[in-house]
Image: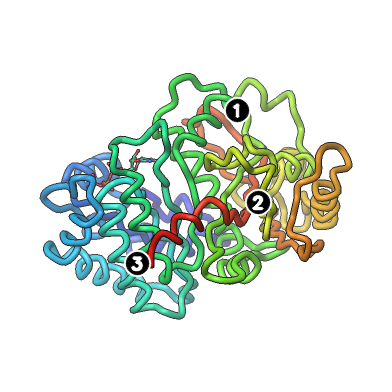
Amino acid sequence: MLQKSFVDPDDTSYNSFFSETHAGQHVPRAIFVDTDPSTRNEILSESPDLFHPENVLGYKQDCKNNFFEGRFMASHLKVKEDVLDRVRLQVDLCSNLQGFFVFHAFGGGTGSGIGCEILHDLHEAFDKKVIFQPIVFPSRQFASSMVEPYNCIFSTFYTRDVVDVTMMLDNQAVYQMVESKQCIKNPDFHHVNRLIAQTISACTTSLRFEAQLSAKMTEIVTNLVPSKEFRYPVLSLAPIRGKDQENHETFSPQEIVTELFETSSVLSDVSHLKSNRYLAAVILLRGNEESFKEQGDGVAGYPKKETLPMEANKCITALQTVKDGTHRSPVKFAPWVSAGFKVGLVAVPPARDARAHSEYSSSTLHFLNFRKLIKPNLQNFP
Ligand SMILES: Nc1nc2c(ncn2[C@@H]2O[C@H](COP(=O)(O)OP(=O)(O)OP(=O)(O)O)[C@@H](O)[C@H]2O)c(=O)[nH]1
């Protein structure tokens, strides 16, 4: 439970994702939905005081891994109405709503079918707001059922006009990152979800903290999505290191940016990355460990605002080096892409979690428009 006593009065970063009650408790502006009743019970038993119980919706049975069963259930069980009611209540508590993050998996029936119906309603009700859609795409090795690719194709098609940015994630790539970079044997969803959460949270740093270079949701869309057809970026995260390695390495913006463009840093299974051309990239950097240690006497252990750990120019130089291939083979961009990349800078390092097996000295995220992956599938539809 986030009580008022834990929150610094000068720190307003919580307000973006938490609403404060009269009792001083901070309640997440989040709504969970699963047709399987066990998920609701699990969330409420693990975090009994954190989430509003009515924002965690559960029903009688799952959607049998079937996209069309999910769509049917969305109307039959009135899931759409329930979710929209809760969303409207949350929106009323917001003072400056920018948009929505809709997390779902495309492999199962609930995530694909019900997720798709909810997205259509959200788009209709809040058509001026940005919708970011982080998706767990099915992966070859970790699929839980044979029909996952079909559900994925259907939901990709049915959500193509209602979402602003679809962030592609896949469990296979993230498992491999956890195993190879964090040196954790037999990782589970807990480890995978931590990396995914870290990546997605980088998109919202400008909303939560005072940014040196701002990259708000609308700015990310403007710089990344030339048309709705090209709104499927892949995400990458760097540097990721195991607990044993982290004290032996330091990272400059140059090294972080270079690592971001390596296939092993991408949270999707993209084996042909080198043969593709990038259409756009957004790079979001957060504060580094050095300034955190030396000058970190600011609010709640964060560095003072005036001691900036990052320099925008270094990032731009790093990007140019990556493009020119000064040290290695160049990363190929479309010919019309010049140096005009969107860069977001926030001088607040990621929070450290005592439970985590690995910690990061800084976290970065970028998007690459990766057209070959999705476009052929969409062309199969009329
Ligand atoms: N990264 C990640 N992937 C998950 C998690 N839980 C499930 N998945 C993946 O999401 C996909 C669908 O998962 P399910 O939860 O079985 O499906 P559902 O959306 O609930 O649909 P139904 O079971 O048909 O109601 C599968 O590919 C899973 O591997 C999780 O906690 N993290």
Q: Nearer the viewer, mark 2 or mark 3?
A: 3
Reading the image, the residue beneath label 2 is: 348
User: What is the three-letter code of the residue carrying label 3?
Assistant: Leu
Question: Disc 1 beta carbon < 8 A from ligand 1?
Answer: no
Residue 287 rendering spot, x and y as whole percentages: 70, 48
Residue 321 image position (x, y, % from top left): 85, 47
Q: How is the image coloured?
A: rainbow
Is 171 placed above or below 17 here? above
How far apart marks 1 and 2 lie (CA) works out to: 24 Å
Whether label 3 lies within 8 Å of ligand 1 gets the answer no
- Name the residue that disc number 3 marks: 119
**In front: 305, or 336?**
336
Q: Residue at x 81, y 63 (%)?
A: 338
Residue tagged by mark 1?
A: 181
Q: Quadrant of the C terminus?
A: bottom left
**Kind of residue indicated by mark 2:** Val
Mark whose residue sits in front, 3 or 1: 3
Picture layout, residue 282 above or below residue 326: below
Image quarter where ligand 1 lies: top left
Q: Position of residue 332 (x, y in %)?
A: 75, 50
Label pair 2/3, CB-CB below 8 angstroms: no
